[in-house]
Amino acid sequence: MFKQLLIALFGASMAFGVAAAEVVSDMHTDMSGCETCHADGMPSDDGAHEAASCLDCHGGLTDMGTPHPEHDGMLECTDCHNVHEDEVGQAPATCDNCH
């Protein structure tokens, strides 16, 4: 589901002339600033608020398509996704760190 959402968002961004190299954090910032993911716009010390923000919008890992359910209870979103570096629609390059 998340992959389908990213593909749809990527397609929509291309239709509106948004650069294909837009990073995920820029897309989220466009929604309501840094507060979209960070409490008071500042990163938390432990990342717990940011992880909860991901789940609030995108649902839990069991709600998403492969490979998400297989990693439920083992990983946080930021273990695979670096939203300040990953481009919209880009798969994380960290799978080979474990597999």
Image (cartoon, grey):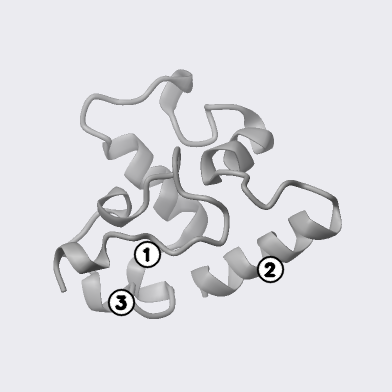
Residue found at x 38% / y 60% = 92
Residue found at x 37% / y 64% = 60
Q: Which residue is mark 3?
A: 69
Do the CB atoms of the residues marked 2 and 1 lie less than 8 Å apart? no
Instruction: Describe the element under mark 2 as helix, strand or loop.
Output: helix
What label sits on residue 60 in the rendered view?
A: 1
Do the CB atoms of the residues marked 3 and 1 lie less than 8 Å apart? no
How crowded pointer 3 is (Cα within 10 Å; few <14, some 14-19, many 20+) is rated as: few
Cα distance between the residues tagged 2 and 1: 19 Å
Q: Nearer the viewer, mark 3 or mark 1?
A: 3
Earlier in the chain: of badge 2 and badge 1, it is 2
Q: Which corner quadrant of the image does residue 83 belong to? A: top left
Amino acid bearing label 2: Ala
Earlier in the chain: of badge 2 and badge 3, it is 2
What label sits on residue 8 in the rendered view?
A: 2
Q: Which corner quadrant of the image does residue 68 belong to? A: bottom left
Viewer-closest of 86 and 59? 86
Left or right? Give the position of 95 relative to 57: left
Cα distance between the residues tagged 3 and 1: 8 Å
Left or right? Give the position of 83 relative to 34: left
Residue 96 drawn at (x, y percent): 21, 68
Amino acid bearing label 1: Gly
Of all residues shown, which one is farthest toward the right? 16
Amino acid bearing label 3: Pro
